[in-house]
């Protein structure tokens, strides 16, 4: 399905399940972000999603309804973004959607990844071709369904003779190693913002620790940090993927939760930082620069701790002209461009094992 249209829309929600991010990109010689838009979930929808993830329980009726509700929210967010951007729909080739992940089991028997946000509803309400369900084809081809962004990171951040590590800190943190145009490597690392945010939401009635201000006042509880770092996930062979099925509030001991908020958050920040450093060290990639993107880039204390431990130049993607919040939705817009033009994506099956394939399922309301 060859396209002459130059604009592509990417829409996604992350493991933080707090908002729908929409990026509209233009692809000619380069990838250019033309418009970014973020729409918060209502507290009611967010509570429903959180309950499904935390309890691993939902009736079929509730699942069907929630799938439609989230699909409607995706469509509204995308339509609002297009209107605000003043880009004509007739110039948009497609929308690529990564729905809200409610279960990610890459080592299940058989493995699967489940997202909600019905693409049929999105196609009908936007009157555009929608491409979705990238993760399950990735799994079918021998990958883990996450992270999906390394090849895009390579397109966006490649710099000749200057290998880079790209760290994305969302609910889950992951990294990509960018060295050569045709070589990719990426892996999930660990909890990112997931545990910090979960603690703030449950015990402090805050969505997150703004700028890491609370954590900055605390002291790391080394005994608890050591216990968290002993989790079997951190001993698994790279590359690997994970989600909130593992990294949720239930992972924290009762004894730990009796400590002060400042010390708890300082410890959870240090867990995120230490797992990032350990993952890079274990993979033994030589690099010159580290670029950080994702919602965690707003946590000043977290970024300060990373800079203190990384012996290389560390910068936010914004210093290169790329909004840290927009990178992941831009990635899906680019994957939409690849799929609608029948261009295969590289699927990482292991450390040095790859295949390729067409990722994404097409849905459209009209021919």
Image (cartoon, helix red, strand yellow):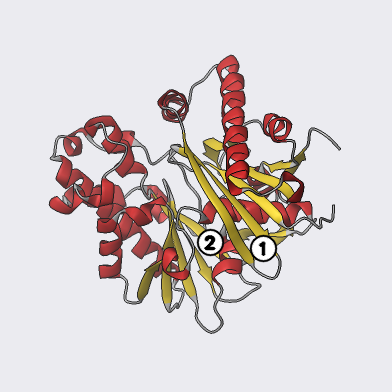
- Residue 95 position, x and y percent, is 68, 45
The numbered disc on residue 186 is 2
Residue 14 versus residue 187 in the image, above or below: above
Give the crowd class for mark 2: few <14, some 14-19, many >=20 residues within 10 Å.
many
- Residue 94 position, x and y percent, is 72, 47
Residue 42 versus residue 108 in the image, above or below: above
* Residue occupying the point 69% across, 35% down: 126
Residue 241 relative to residue 249: left or right: right
Number of disc labels: 2
Asked whether the viewer can see residue 219, the reply is no
User: Which residue is tagged 1?
Assistant: 354
* Residue occupying the point 68% across, 42% down: 132
Which image quarter: residue 157?
bottom right
Asked whether the viewer can see residue 330, the reply is yes
Separation of marks 2 and 1 at Cα, in angstroms: 12 Å
- Residue 335 position, x and y percent, is 67, 54
Q: Residue furthest bottom?
A: 161
Residue 226 versus residue 276 in the image, above or below: above
Residue 259 relative to residue 315: left or right: left
């Amino acid at each position: 399905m060859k396209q002459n249209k130059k604009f592509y829309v990417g829409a996604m929600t992350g493991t933080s399940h707090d908002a729908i991010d929409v990026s509209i990109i233009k692809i000619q010689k380069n990838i250019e972000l033309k418009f970014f838009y973020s729409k918060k979930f209502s507290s009611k929808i967010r509570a429903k999603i959180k309950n499904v993830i935390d309890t691993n329980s939902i009736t079929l009726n509730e699942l069907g309804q929630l799938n439609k509700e989230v699909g409607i929210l995706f469509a509204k967010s995308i339509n609002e973004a297009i209107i605000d951007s003043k880009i004509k729909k007739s110039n948009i080739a497609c929308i690529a959607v990564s729905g809200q992940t409610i279960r990610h089991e890459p080592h299940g028997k058989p493995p699967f990844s489940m997202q909600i946000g019905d693409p049929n509803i999105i196609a009908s309400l936007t009157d555009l071709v929608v491409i979705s369900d990238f993760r399950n084809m990735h799994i079918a081809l021998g990958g883990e369904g996450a992270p999906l962004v390394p090849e895009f990171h390579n397109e966006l951040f490649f710099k000749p003779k200057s290998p880079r590590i790209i760290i994305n800190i969302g609910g889950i943190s992951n990294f990509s190693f960018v060295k050569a145009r045709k070589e990719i490597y990426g892996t999930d690392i660990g909890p990112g913002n997931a545990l910090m945010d979960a603690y703030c939401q449950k015990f402090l009635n805050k969505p997150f620790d703004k700028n890491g201000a609370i954590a900055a006042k605390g002291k790391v509880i080394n005994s608890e940090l050591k216990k968290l770092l002993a989790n079997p996930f951190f001993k698994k062979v790279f590359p690997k993927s994970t989600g909130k099925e593992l990294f949720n509030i239930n992972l924290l001991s009762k004894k730990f939760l009796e400590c002060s908020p400042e010390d708890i958050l300082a410890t959870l920040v240090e867990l995120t930082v230490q797992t990032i450093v350990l993952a890079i060290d274990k993979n033994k990639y030589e690099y010159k620069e580290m670029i950080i993107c994702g919602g965690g880039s707003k946590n000043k204390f977290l970024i300060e701790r990373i800079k203190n431990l990384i012996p290389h130049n560390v910068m936010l993607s914004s210093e290169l002209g790329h909004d840290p919040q927009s990178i992941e939705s831009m990635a899906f817009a680019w994957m939409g461009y690849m799929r609608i033009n029948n261009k295969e994506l590289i699927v990482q099956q292991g450390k040095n094992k790859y295949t390729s394939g067409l990722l994404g399922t097409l849905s459209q309301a009209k021919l």
